Amino acid sequence: MPDLTVNGQRHALDAPVGRSLADFLRDDLGLTGTKIACYEGHCGSCTVLVDGIPTLSCITLAHVLEDREITTIEGLRDHAMMDAFVRTDAVQCGFCTPGQVVSAVALVEANASPSRDEIRHAMAGNLCRCGTYPKIEEAIATWRD
Amino acid sequence: MARLIRTEKEVEGQYEEVWLVVEEDPLDQWPAGPGDVVGRPAQRVDGRDRASGTARYTADITLPGMLHAAIVRSPYARASVKRFDATAALGMPGVRAVLAPGELERLVPAPGYQGQPVAAVAADSYGLARAAVDALDVEWEVREPLLDPEEAVRRESFVSAPKRYSRGDVARGFAQADVVIEAEYRTQSVLHNAFEPHQSICEWVDDELHVYTSTQFIWGVRNELAENLGLPADKVRIVCEYMGGGFGAKNGAGTHTYVAAELAKRTRRPVRCALTRHEENLDTGNRNATIQKLRAGARGDGTLVALQGEYIAAVGWSGWLAPTAGPMQILYACDNVETVEYGAKLNTPPMAAFRAPGFAEGTFGLECLLDEVAAKLDLDPLELRRRNHADADPKDERPFSSKNLIECYRRADAHWARRDDVRARSEGPWKHGVGVASQIWYGAGGPPSYAWVRVGSDGRAQVITAMQDIGTGSRTAMAQIAAEELGLPLDRVAVALGDSARGPYASISAGSSTIPSMGPAVRAAAADAARQIVEIAAQRYHKEERTLSLKGGSVVCSDGGAWPLEAVVGVMEAGQILGKGARGPNPAGMQTLTFGVHVAEVAVDVETGEIRVARVAAIHDVGRIVNPLGASSQVEGGVIQGIGHTLSETRLLDPGTGAVLTRSLDAYKLPTIADVPEIVAEFVDQPDAHLTNLGSKGLGEPPIVPVAAAIANAIRDATGADVRSLPITREEMLRALDEARRREHEREQVPA
């Protein structure tokens, strides 16, 4: 049986081929911090990191990720970005927020001081229906404060 | 003392006469301005839970033995089921039950819109349920759908009788007018698309129905289910601790809840019924499209002397007639007003309340019309609005409990004054301009609503009420209000909500009513607890009660003594102080509304029709602001949703079949972070002296109301073109530019 590394821990991938990473995380591992809002790769709510790259877990198959490092929102709870989102009120209903935080972490890990344009470019795939965008931009622009 | 009164209750602009038991509201309001906690920016008390994914939404709950339901939906806008055979589906592994057409009132054999539920399946997994749906043998008889709202009005196909309103004499008013402007405006159907899809898990525990659901109204769902399922209300328990957005589409139980309840009953197992994103776009309601034929008559000085509107709302198969004519009736002081509203019954998905239903659409028409009047009279649009200010409710002359719209206009001056600078930025094909639009909406809230406050011997407090926080920050606001009253820091107040079995009745989170309905009840409960703490302290320290108050986590005495709260109540050991509070009545004989004004700055490429919104200043008067940080987020969210409504969002129907073409978040264009302008949120922040012990009105809906009109008016300022149809696509923009050019050309042809 293949196994997957999630947040530094190895897990047996005891699921039929074709299982999405999102379902594996939520239903098999109980890591429900990753949210599913569209299940077809359009909204960004299910974003996780695969080797540090933001990845849509709802349209990624679990079985192709052997030997890769998967990081979910549960693995980023001590990251300074979390504080930045809470401090700047970059949370409304919160359903898209874990995915926003994951994308934001990927951005600042690659570029610690992104410009406003770079933030907008990197975050444009994470939709938010409540319209928290100004606060998300603020959170990322001030994440180390 | 509790009093029984007969009163008018308003939700989302719908009024009904009800009996209400109301309790006195004897507390004086806090002074205006920031207190120790209320009126100061607060981080969300549940911000970390939501951001870190520890918050448990309905979507995250799994019960032992839980089955998954899938709904069978009509592929046709108007059809009937000729044959329904579930034999093959029921023979599939893991399939546990099928509900055939007609087995539930909401599963209909003759659907009236594409996507209407006709049957349902329960299976061990969602995938198996979906496969069983595909295996059902259904034969349809398809009929011609009615899709055109104007044709529906001609055929008198209405969801309810047309609503007519008039005051004064519009014919005489138009006769007195120096200018008359006539225009037709159209708004499109837009979809809520809250990110947590509609869903419920139903479980029967003995004869009790437990429902975990994503809802804006725990108690409404409880009462609705009890009534329709023939259960005593206390046998229905509703749980919604965290909720992923609603915007008006989650006010009722919804078919998915009835399906889950029935399948759970038949299978004796818990059943989840969750909608997919495509189902969200098909059958969870929408802001209905409108056609608005409007006329305004004004004197040379801008005084409005007549307003007339004929409104057609494309309501769909069912729904209600949202008050699209409302802004025309109440925004301005005009003696002669006549409106008629038709609610077209069509073979299209039903409408549902969507953030200021009716008013967002109606304000677009009215406020664009007003700017066309201003242009004709060569008057300053902001000045025109000042001159027509209504000092009392124009419908019945009732005084307003508070109204600071003139102050909003005064604050708008600074943003309006940027006009010359903004216009001067025009370069090449890019034309820049500034537009203004006023906002009016409800937001008074009302009784009944109740809360309890518990203070333990550790000196910490807990607010208990069975309300919901749909993402607006209600939990935080309630904690702030209790903290202020108890003289505690915010981190010593917790809020327990989201379970009808574990707290008293609480208001709907719709109609901008959570803070104005719940806030005063929470404050009353905290005050009841504070009174008891003072009584204990007076006895323990031999002081007179009138010399004691709660501040900074202590009981303080006017003689300088102070004792930490935990020391005072520590004597209780396991005992607890329990305070209870109720929402008092709204002020009698007064009208309570919310007000505001937006100033938008746009740039238009007149060659391609591309529109960019550069800046929106939003100034609102909603009484006392409890949390300025959360309030600014509400305004930003409303403005951004408004920008989507104005420029990109539209539900497209196939004009021949009535099929919904925009079912994904790829096809249905929500604003992204890259579409967001600079947004400046300002509040008058004056408590409404007549409204409750808090003086706060609601803020959820006001910020979306004037957005479309302010942007359209800015486009007119930039280009001279009258855009009259939402969304303002490039096609609509180029059409309007073309019309403006033609008008200009004709003017040049007329000999002087």
Image (tube, rainbow, N blue to C red):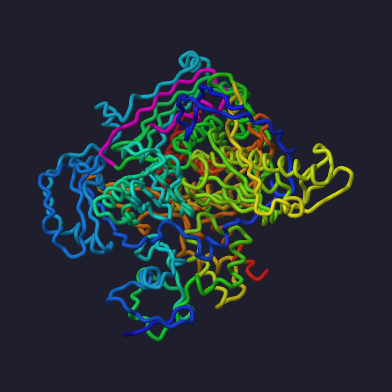
Judge whether residue B649 can be spotted in this image: yes
Name the spot of residue B74 as percent of width and height, x first: 21, 48
Question: In this rendering, is residue A92 above or below B306?
Answer: below
The magenta region covers B321-348
Q: Position of residue B152 (x, y in %)?
A: 27, 31
Q: Nearer the viewer, residue B525 or A52?
A: B525
* Placement of B307 over or under B557, stated as above or below: above
Indicate the position of residue B642 as horizontal and vertical percent values.
Answer: 49, 46
Quarter assignment of residue B248:
top left
Up/down of A134 relative to B687, above or below: below
Q: Is residue B342 magenta?
A: yes
Q: Is residue B41 left or right of residue B585?
A: right
Q: Is residue B304 magenta?
A: no
On the question of residue B739 being in view, the answer is no
- The residue located at (31%, 62%) in the rendering is B65
Q: Closer to the camera, B73 or B570?
A: B570
Residue under the image location 29 percent in, 56 percent down? B269
Image quadrant containing the N terminus of chain B: top right
Give the residue displayed 54% in from the left and 69% down from the top: A104
Which one is in front, B731 or B287?
A: B287
* Horizontal side of residue B559 vs A9, given as left or right: right
* Residue B488 in the image, given as x and y percentages of width and height: 72, 51
**Disc count in the image?**
0
Left or right of A104, for residue A56: left
